[in-house]
Amino acid sequence: MAYTTSNSAADTGYFVESDEPRRINVKDAARMLARNRQEMIANDLSRLAAEEYLEDIMQHLRHMEDETLPDANLIDMQREIQWFMRPYLIDFLIEAHAAFALLPETLFLTVNLLDRYCSKRVVYKQHYQLVGCAALLIAAKYGDKKDRVPQINELNNMCCGLYDSGMFTQMEMHVLNTLEWTVGHPTVDFFTQLIVAEEGDDREVEHMAAYISEIALYQRDFVSTKPSIMGRASLALARAILGRPEVNDGEWDHVANATVLALSQHLHQPSQSLSRKYTSPYFSRASVKLAEFLAHQAAISRRAQQAPPSPPAEPTLSSNNSYIYSTPQKGCGAVPGMAEGYMTPPITPEGVCYGAVDPMNRYVPPRCPATPTPQISSGVGYQSHHQEQQYAPYSYGEYNTQMVA
């Protein structure tokens, strides 16, 4: 049964059922079969080539990653460009990137070109946005769809007519000459896609990692971080936020751990433009889920601070000093095997006037201090010795330090 269009005037534009089989030309059928066969062969060859040259491909990407990594220390030497201006420009680039519906890797390549240019040339404050627009043009022409490449007049309208149309072309050529026409750069999104395909992460983790990676674009701390490390760290942090199991592929090092820790410290106040972008269901509402996670962690921290302090735990006694700190019972003599030290006296006082009575009918004051002291023959002497013990811990140097303070 096939669906054909009706020729009657009343049913024009509607599909009606017909029992007549759809006739296909033999030549068209052969052409379709040949095209399908070619696609299958091409996919098999691509897969085999990828498996055979995967090590060489990854080595080349590592080399490109090192060669095209910007230096944040050189950007610090800019005379007019300051780091507090960066969030405003990144907001503009993210909004322009979303308005033209460009690919995710285009945004990361744009910021990479911008930082590489700022680490090689002095940029004036009034040209900072122009450099960002030129970097967006280059990145879109390099790897995005040709029908989505922004036009100069469209960028000029987004800049409120601040620049002439010819300035965009001049700055685009100047950026390319400065970078010696080296545009290719393995972005964070590229490494993220590789890890996602290898580890089998879902779309929710992928969108959360993309959100975290774009938050890092605003910070100076991650300008000189390698994209491979950034992709691995953002995915690890995304799994932790969403409660997914950890993945240990054996490639973690100190730099990756430090990157995860640094990323976790910059998640509390994301840009409003970026947060609004990731609120949509298309990105799995990543910004909403991150805000809920941070609020939950803050509530746990507040409850921990308001909770009463727990009582101190009793010290664990070892077998070597258990005899020294144990309280003797009534009628117990010396503990066998104890070479030195005094035993703690009983808690309950006994004897006349709470003192002990010896066979010579001499009064012995109670040994109240926990720290054992030599026996004193009179009460006055005991009190003096007790006062002396009270001030004994303060040495001359410590006393002088306290007086000076």
Image (cartoon, grey):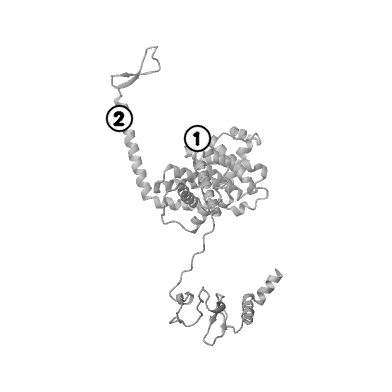
User: Which is more foreground, mark 2 or mark 1?
Assistant: 1
Residue 69 visible (yes or no): no
Q: Is residue 383 left or right of residue 61?
A: right
Residue 30 visible (yes or no): yes
Quadrant of residue 175 in the image?
A: top right
> As drawn, which residue projects farthest toward the right?
404
Count neighbours of disc 2 (C-alpha within 10 A) and say few if under 14, some if 14 to 19, many if 20 or more. Answer: few
Which x, y percent locates residue 159? 63, 36
Relative to 102, say whether 11 is above or below.
Answer: above
Q: Amino acid at mark 2?
A: Ala
Q: Residue 389 or 278: which is nearer the viewer?
A: 389
Residue at the (57%, 83%) spot, across then down: 363
Q: Amino acid at mark 1?
A: Lys
Name the residue tied to disc 2.
30
Per the image, label 1 sits on a secondary structure element best described as helix
Mark toward the start of the polypeptide (2 vs 1): 2
Which x, y percent locates residue 311? 52, 62
Q: Residue 168 or 306: which is nearer the viewer?
A: 306
**Quadrant for the C terminus in the image:** bottom right
Residue at the (54%, 46%) spot, across then down: 215
Which x, y percent locates residue 20? 28, 19
Check residue 238 in the rendering and tell me which mark sits there, or answer none.
none
Number of marks in the rendered image: 2
Relative to 358, say whether 131 is above or below.
Answer: above
Check residue 146 in the rendering and tell me which mark sits there, or answer none.
1
Which x, y percent locates residue 1? 29, 22
Q: Is residue 21 left or right of residue 271?
A: left
Relative to 139, say whether 343 is above or below.
Answer: below
